[in-house]
Image (cartoon, grey):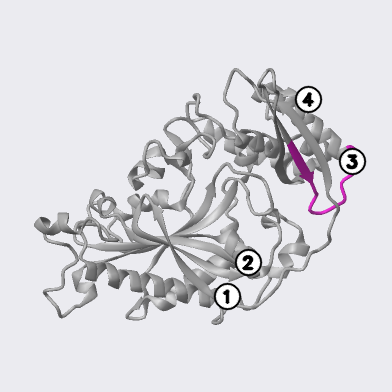
Amino acid sequence: MLKLPIHYLKKLPKSSLRNYCAELGVQHNIFNRFKKDDYTNITDRVMYHMNKNLHLKNNHPLSIVRQRIVNYFNKTFVIRNNPVFSVYDQLPPIVTVDQNFDSLLVPTNHPSRNKSDCYYINRNYLLRAHMTAHQMDILKTGLNNFLIIGDVYRRDEIDKTHYPVFHQIDAVRLKDSKDFFPDNDHFQIFEASDDAESIRGQEKQPCHTIEAVKIMEEELKSTLEGLAKSLFGEKIEFQWVDTHFPFTQPSWELEILHNGQWLETLGCGIMKQSILTSAGVTDKIGWAFGLGLERISMCLYKIPDIRLFWSKDSGFLNQFDLDNINSNITYKAVSQFPQCKNDISFWLPESKEFSSNDFYDLVRNVGGDLIEQVKLVDKFVHPKSKKVSHCYRIIYRHMEKTLTQKEVNIVHKEIEKNIRNQLGVTIR
């Protein structure tokens, strides 16, 4: 029997409950094909959100931003009136550990591989944590320019800007020596092998010439600056920040000035040449970037809460029924319902490791989208026993009606029962 979140069992109309059960049943059938092991940590809540494809739905802000970005690339990169970039936006979200990490040179001890960060089906399969997981497979097809768009899954904290499912666009562009200067037979992308050691200290990969890297950097940055202006207007202020990613070198983040603060909008860089070599590409250099659709949409349309993207309320969706997807609009709250706040305190188990992300995931699985935020408000270590206690404040708010404290208490009690049984904590 399916284990449904308690508020669905108690509050959903029968027709909605049947639909929920049917959709979740389909997902369970998918996962039943995979053998479970000690890494299996996918919840029903996350299963239910799979394959919703919000980025492809008409009159949805994520779909609008997706189309605006695709349109920008179709306009910017054209050969003989044909768009250069191919678009992949319906790739299945289940990937191998090799696709998600190994093919992208993510170290085996990197924290992004942890069970506390990812939704694993078993030790060998997981729900993709980034759209870059598909990069190697597409490179092997021989394509030089492509966009990959879809839903990604990560275990994280709970607040207005974090959700276990969100959407990303990744892009790759490759160039060979003729793409730089068609009439120049002497332009070199790669350093001579006997010169490689002398350039290891420079801010580039040893195999690349500094000229090729600088030209690629200029094209990458000008492309993304143009994208920022296309989305936010010509007057948008931005800055570049040096950073590090396992799969690019050098690497940068693009920040925009939003509400008086610098906000990271995307990461990018020159692709690691060893990734291209593994894909059978030996004569090209590439750049790549990735950005989150939710972050862009929240800034662009002033959407205050990430849960709204999953709303089926016509009052929300009708605001994005646009004749012109480039229209400047600001989201207007349909209504503002009050919060309910309940604290929960417990002693951490002494016999096994405790992760806050395990707690957040369990709270989300029981409370669903009633949960607006979960925040650790206090830590306490007993002076004698050295036992550790955590106190979390759970903020409940329904997106479409006023919650009563009685309704919240039912869910809160269910959370207490589940964390006691599943995480081995002792409620204080």
Question: Compared with residue 139, is residue 11 higher up or lower down, i.e. above or below?
Answer: above
Label drawn at residue 405: 3
Q: Nearer the viewer, residue 63 or 295?
A: 295
From the top left corner, tell me how far across and down residue 308 is, in percent: 71, 57
Question: Compared with residue 256, is residue 328 higher up or lower down, i.e. above or below?
Answer: below
Q: Which residue is mark 1?
A: 232
Give the side of residue 253 with respect to residue 320, left or right. Answer: left
Q: What range is drawn magenta here?
A: 392-406
Q: Residues within 10 Å of mark 1 (few under 14, many from 20)?
A: some
Q: Residues within 10 Å of mark 3 (few under 14, many from 20)?
A: few
Q: Which residue is mark 2?
A: 299
Q: Which residue is mark 4?
A: 428
Q: Residues within 10 Å of mark 2 (few under 14, many from 20)?
A: some
The answer to whether mark 1 and mark 3 are in CB contact below 8 A is: no
The answer to whether mark 4 and mark 1 are in CB contact below 8 A is: no
Q: Is residue 204 magenta?
A: no
How far apart in space, not on screen, are marks 4 and 2 (Cα)? 40 Å
Give the residue displayed 15% in from the left and 62% down from the top: 191
Location of the N terminus by quadrant is top right
Looking at the image, can residue 190 be seen?
yes
Give the side of residue 298 with respect to residue 99, left or right. Answer: right
- Most extreme residue toward the left, as rendered? 194
